[in-house]
Image: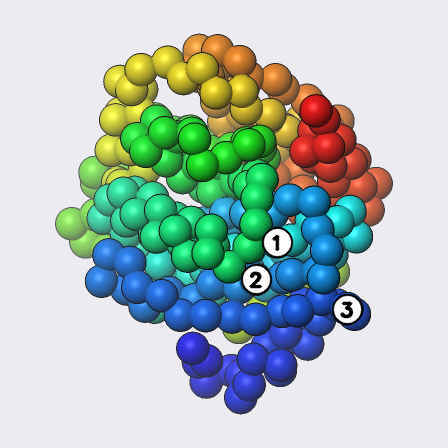
Amino acid sequence: MFNKNFKTFEEYSQIYGLTFDGIEHRSFDFSAGGNKLVGQVFQPKEYRATVIIVHGYLVHCGTFGKFIKYMLDNHMAVAMFDLPGHGLSGGDRGVTSDFSQYTIALDEFLSIIKEKLHGPFHIVGHSTGGAIVMDYITGFGSGDFDKVVLAAPLVRFKLWHLSKIGCAIYMPFMKHIFRLFRNISSDAQYVDFLKHRDHLQVKSISLRWVRAIFKWEKKISKMPVVNKPVFVVQGTNDTTVAWKYNLKFILAKFKNADIEFVENAQHEFFNEAKQYRDAVFELIRDYLYKD
């Protein structure tokens, strides 16, 4: 499981703040789509439900320590895995040719988690994780989940049409473009950690991934309308995704969607400044607790 940056799972857990008193934290390997992936479970002795977290593009499980702790403090077990090409999982860093690779991985992960933890099972997808959750629901169905949360979900990103032109021009000559960290969070310490001290961060954007998201957006737009209720949380200062377009798309595709805004929150709001982060966490908790 470990790359050259970590000697043990305990060292990894300490670096990313994933050690919690009274919580059984364990990892496991599994395979999906030809990749060896790594999942993690955070299990209290007693819990009311299990929350499955699907992270976004270029990040990994280790960046969700604050939210994991909040869910544990609110009597939830937590399970998540590093997507192919991310974090501790195998695969080319940040690369995919088809989004179905992620959805197949989620399906395999769910089959394992159902044997390790009890339900009801809720799912929270952030950014690209939100796109993966939507892809799963429209393709595999929503019966696995009691509650569905889409956090700053990706359908289209900013400069969508310009990026299509750029991708067509540059893809024959280059495979990646340099990743910028501007305007993702107002927590300066978090951004500094991502840029300089997080060895699991993917530091470039794959043009194959960009082409794959264009292909996925075209596919999901043709999928039938979904009746499953979904809860969407969106920051109004998000300059990563084209959130105004995305929310219109989600309202049309998921006819029982409920949307809440967090004023002035940026895209990485699981690692935003405390005032925004707390607002996001409380909205998600209240939704998951709702009968």
Question: What is the crowding at mark 3: few (fewer than 14 residues within 10 Å), some, or many (at least 20)?
Answer: few
- Image coordinates of residue 202 in percent, x first then y, are 45, 62
Instruction: Tell which residue pokes out farthest to the right in this image.
Output: 275
| Secondary structure under the numbered disc 1 in the rendered image | strand
What residue is pinned by disc 2? 41
Residue at (23% x, 48% y) in the render: 97
Q: Please give left or right for residue 161 compared with residue 41 in the image.
A: left
**CB under 8 Å between callouts 2 and 3?**
no
Whether residue 106 is visible to the viewer of this picture, yes or no, is yes
Where, quadrant-wise, is the C terminus in this rendering?
Answer: top right
The numbered dot on residue 78 is 1
The earlier-in-sequence mark between 2 and 3 is 3
The kind of residue on which mark 3 rests is Gly
Residue at (66% x, 69% y) in the render: 24
The earlier-in-sequence mark between 1 and 3 is 3
Q: CA distance from mark 1 to mark 3?
A: 14 Å
Q: CA distance from mark 2 to mark 3?
A: 13 Å
- Position of residue 268 relative to residue 248, above or below, is below
- Position of residue 263 relative to residue 213, above or below, is above
The kind of residue on which mark 2 rests is Val
- Image coordinates of residue 131 in percent, x first then y, are 42, 35
Whether residue 92 is visible to the viewer of this picture, yes or no, is no
The kind of residue on which mark 1 rests is Val
The numbered dot on residue 22 is 3
